[in-house]
Image (cartoon, grey):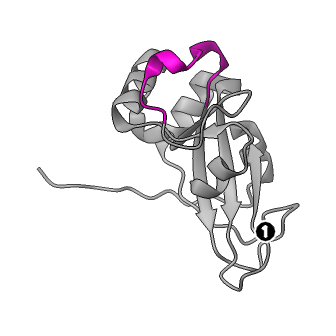
């Protein structure tokens, strides 16, 4: 997350209480996003007060990361990741207010990069999908 925040392009971390408040305002689960994006950088430390944010300007950001040095920047070929039903439902509900950011930090030390896209872009680029159930016991 620090990679995106340190870019100075509007990505922000928020504290857990603020994240829960934002999730309530957008009527989504707080686990469907990692960061928020604003039109400009406010600070580089986690935002700890909801009052510091104009909710109309927030985009919720779900971050997916990978260290495979073979990932192609233009196609994201070889980028494998999980995407939950809750994340998909949030993306459908929030439309332009929900984005997925794919971060590549190659383990061979080559240049880091990120690609931001919508849910619709994600499905346009998807080669395949594999459904998985995550189950916990009572």
Please name the residue that numbered disc 1 is placed on: 77
Kindly identify the residue that appears in the image at 70 percent across and 76 percent down: 106
**Among all residues in the image, which is located at the extreme left?**
138
Against 70, residue 117 (above or below) is above
The location of residue 73, given as percent across then percent down, is 84, 64
The location of residue 94, given as percent across then percent down, is 60, 23
Q: Nearer the viewer, residue 34 or 120?
A: 34
Write the start and end of the magenta stretch as one range: 47-59
Kindly identify the residue that appears in the image at 68 percent across and 78 percent down: 68
Q: Nearer the viewer, residue 9 or 92?
A: 9
The answer to whether residue 55 is magenta is yes
Against 68, residue 27 (above or below) is above
- Callout 1 secondary element: loop
Res. 27 in view:
no
The location of residue 135, given as percent across then percent down, is 28, 55
Res. 78 in view:
yes
Against 135, residue 110 (above or below) is below
């Amino acid at each position: 997350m620090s990679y995106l925040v340190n870019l100075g392009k509007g990505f922000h971390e928020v504290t857990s209480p603020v994240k829960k408040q934002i999730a309530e305002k957008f009527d989504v689960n707080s686990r469907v996003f990692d960061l928020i994006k604003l039109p400009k950088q406010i600070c580089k430390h986690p935002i700890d007060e909801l009052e510091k944010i104009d909710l109309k300007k927030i985009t919720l950001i779900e971050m997916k990361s990978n260290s495979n040095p073979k990932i192609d920047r233009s196609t994201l070929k070889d980028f494998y990741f999980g995407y939950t039903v809750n994340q998909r439902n949030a993306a459908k509900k929030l439309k332009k207010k929900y984005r997925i950011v794919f971060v590549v930090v190659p383990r061979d030390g080559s240049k880091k990069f990120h690609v931001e896209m919508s849910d619709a872009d994600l499905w346009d680029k998807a080669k395949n999908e594999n459904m998985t159930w995550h189950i916990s016991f009572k």
